[in-house]
Image: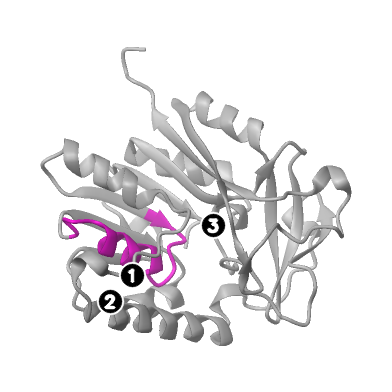
């Protein structure tokens, strides 16, 4: 997948390790990375099993009592709003969308789940696993490279769910994706605060994966420079070690600690302004 190598997803870690993140570095190259990250078999098969159970549990329920697990992800509300405004399918690109959990929850939340065109961009192994789970679904496709996407595609929403911080050259990536003229960039579970940008390593099973912690104001300024207004921000409450809690970062200096991640939304500026 373009600009994204082996990475983690979410906050599932070795229960014998007290901390999710360790060390402070200036670049990915300085980090003591190791392992296969999210592509490790012990992790990917776990997610496949969880997703299949979610789909099976929901298939036996009436639509009005479906198990809507959107938590702090605002993608379902954004897409539903766009559906009310547009008469065509809503086009969504989910970068690092994994095997399709966010898609599954979105489709269960919407009253018109057929009126979406959803693309997940992820690594080859993850795409194969997701495509197998959703092999009969016509609204969802998986791609392992930006080059697989038609250059004339215009997305309504490009979504990053717990994924942009794994991208070393993230500015380069955003600039590429901006070529698809999205109206919205939505970031769920974004690791941003008042500190200066730094890199750390995430402990993920047998792996150590480099990740960014971003200066939030600088990130917003970058989007302003490429033609987007900062439109929305909310607190994301992660589930860590099986429960909702503040991020365990007391092994970092106080000025580099983050209590919670955030959700942020950027909207394309009107062309006449």
Give the structural element (helix, strand or loop) at label 2.
helix
Q: Is residue 154 magenta?
A: no
The part of the image, by quadrant, that contains residue 255 is top right
**Disc nearer the start of the sequence (3/1):** 1
Q: CA–CA distance between discs 3 and 1?
A: 24 Å
| Residue shown at the point (36%, 56%) measured from the top left | 147
Q: CA–CA distance between discs 3 and 2?
A: 26 Å
Quarter containing the C terminus: top left
Q: Which residue is mark 1?
A: 67
Is residue 246 depicted above or below 219 in this figure? Answer: below
Give the structural element (helix, strand or loop) at label 3.
loop
| Residue shown at the point (22%, 55%) measured from the top left | 117
The part of the image, by quadrant, that contains residue 107 is bottom left
Q: Is the residue marked by circle 2 packed among few (<14), some (14-19), or many (20+) residues within 10 Å?
A: some
Tag 1–tag 2 contact (CB < 8 Å): yes
Residue 153 shows in this picture = no
Q: Position of residue 45 (x, y in %)?
A: 48, 86
């Amino acid at each position: 997948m373009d600009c994204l190598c082996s990475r983690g997803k979410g906050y599932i870690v070795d229960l014998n390790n007290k901390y999710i993140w360790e060390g402070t570095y200036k670049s990915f190259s300085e980090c003591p990375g190791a392992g296969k990250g999210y592509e490790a078999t012990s992790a990917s098969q776990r997610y496949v099993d969880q997703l299949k159970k979610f789909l099976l549990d929901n298939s036996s329920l009436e639509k009005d009592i479906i198990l809507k697990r959107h938590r702090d992800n605002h993608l379902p509300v954004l897409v539903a709003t766009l559906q009310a405004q547009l008469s065509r399918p809503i086009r969504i690109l989910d970068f690092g969308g994994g095997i399709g959990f966010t898609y599954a929850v979105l489709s269960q939340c919407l009253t018109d789940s057929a009126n979406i065109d959803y693309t997940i961009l992820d690594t080859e192994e993850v795409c194969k696993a997701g495509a197998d789970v959703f092999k009969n679904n016509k609204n969802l496709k998986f791609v392992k490279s930006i080059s697989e996407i038609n250059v004339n595609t215009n997305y309504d929403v490009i979504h990053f769910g717990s994924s942009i911080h794994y991208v070393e050259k993230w500015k380069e990536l955003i600039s590429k994706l901006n070529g698809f003229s999205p109206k919205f960039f939505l970031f769920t579970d974004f690791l941003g605060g008042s500190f200066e940008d730094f890199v750390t390593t995430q402990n993920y099973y047998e792996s150590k994966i480099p990740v960014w912690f971003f200066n939030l104001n600088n990130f917003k300024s970058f989007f302003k420079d490429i033609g987007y207004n900062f439109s929305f921000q909310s607190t994301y409450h992660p589930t860590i070690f099986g429960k909702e809690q503040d991020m365990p970062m007391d092994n970092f200096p106080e000025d580099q600690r983050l209590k919670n991640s955030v959700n942020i939304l950027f909207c394309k500026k009107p062309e006449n302004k």
